[in-house]
């Protein structure tokens, strides 16, 4: 088990879509930080709550390893890594504690515009490009569809034009990216938003009280903003 700590650590995205809204949400909860020079670690001033600024992909693992107590991350990223852990027999190590009402998007299947969509049976034998291979594999398995998952770390939406896949499974917000690539959304796998993620088991040291207090403040702030 991880060593006892008396300060809380929260991981948020360093750059990207969730970076600014995550920081401003925590500021609205009354947190402030002494800016560190390298800006990867921000020392909490108003409360013993420090920030770690990281890639969003690293946030679930930091919670699983006990390096951070909370993280603000897309449900899509948390679910993907959770599904990947389950697929290799690892126990659940984190959970979404609260929806935060920003970063809304959908994980969707999108097919070339000229396809006539008749349903999931149509996916049999097809190649699907995605950065969410575990969520997609679970979704296909639950529907008994035998399709090939092609894992790509980026530029998923050009895969059909390049011929490396027949269709894609990707995040969509406005839909402009799909349209620009002559793709149309046909199925929703996941409704996502930024979530506060935490461990499945609360630590039994000074952090427990801080975590409870932060959750209470967060609930107040998110409710007022709604
Ligand atoms: O560097 P780091 O690894 O931390 O960042 P990242 O590049 O992996 O993530 P980032 O900042 O792009 O996204 C962080 C999180 O924002 C995602 O995990 C989602 O939870 C959330 N989010 C919300 C989105 C979108 N909306 C979104 N639209 N993430 C990505 N997109 C993509 C979409 O796939 C498309 O390619 O943005 C493009 C524009 O979308 P449309 O539909 O508006 O055209
Ligand atoms: Zn990322």
Image (cartoon, rainbow, N blue to C red):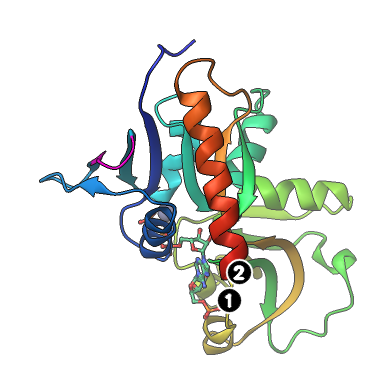
Circle nearer the N terminus (2, 1):
2
Q: Are marks 2 and 1 in contact (CB under 8 Å)?
A: yes
Q: Is residue 159 above or below residue 2?
A: below
Q: Is 88 inside the magenta-drawn segment?
A: no
The residue indicated by pointer 2 is: 105
Say whether residue 5 is left or right of residue 163.
left
Residue at 51% in and 33% down: 211
Chief secondary structure of the magenta span? loop
Say whether residue 72 is left or right of residue 165.
left
Residue at 78% in and 52% down: 139
Q: Quadrant of residue 169?
A: bottom right
The residue indicated by pointer 1 is: 173
Under 8 Å from ligand 1: the CB of mark 2? Answer: yes
Q: Secondary structure at mark 1?
A: loop
Residue 214, numbered circle = none
Under 8 Å from ligand 1: the CB of mark 1? Answer: yes
Task: Quote the CA–CA distance across marks 2 and 1.
Answer: 5 Å
Residue at 52% in and 82% down: 177
Q: Is 45 inside the magenta-drawn segment?
A: yes
Q: Position of residue 79 (x, y in %)?
A: 64, 46
Query: Magenta stretch?
Result: 43-47
> Can residue 77 be seen by looking at this rendering?
no
């Amino acid at each position: 088990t991880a060593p006892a700590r008396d300060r809380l650590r929260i991981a948020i995205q360093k750059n990207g879509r969730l970076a600014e809204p995550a920081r401003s949400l925590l500021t609205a909860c009354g947190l402030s930080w002494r800016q560190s020079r390298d800006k990867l670690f921000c020392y909490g001033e108003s409360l013993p709550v420090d920030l770690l600024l990281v890639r969003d992909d690293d946030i679930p693992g930091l919670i699983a390893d006990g390096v951070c107590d909370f993280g603000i991350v897309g449900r899509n990223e948390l679910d993907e890594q959770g599904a990947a852990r389950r697929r290799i027999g690892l126990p659940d190590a984190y959970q979404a504690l609260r929806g935060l009402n920003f970063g809304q998007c959908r994980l969707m299947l999108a097919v070339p515009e000229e396809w006539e969509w008749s349903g999931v049976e149509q996916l049999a034998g097809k190649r699907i490009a995605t950065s969410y291979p575990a969520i997609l594999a679970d979704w296909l398995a639950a529907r008994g569809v035998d399709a090939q998952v092609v894992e790509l770390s980026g530029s998923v939406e050009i895969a059909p034009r390049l011929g490396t896949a027949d269709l894609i499974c990707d995040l969509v917000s406005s839909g402009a990216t799909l349209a620009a690539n002559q793709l149309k959304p046909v199925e929703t796998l996941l409704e996502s938003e930024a979530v506060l993620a935490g461990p499945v088991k609360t630590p039994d040291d000074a952090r427990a009280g801080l975590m409870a207090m932060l959750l209470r403040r967060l609930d107040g702030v998110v409710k007022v903003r709604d």
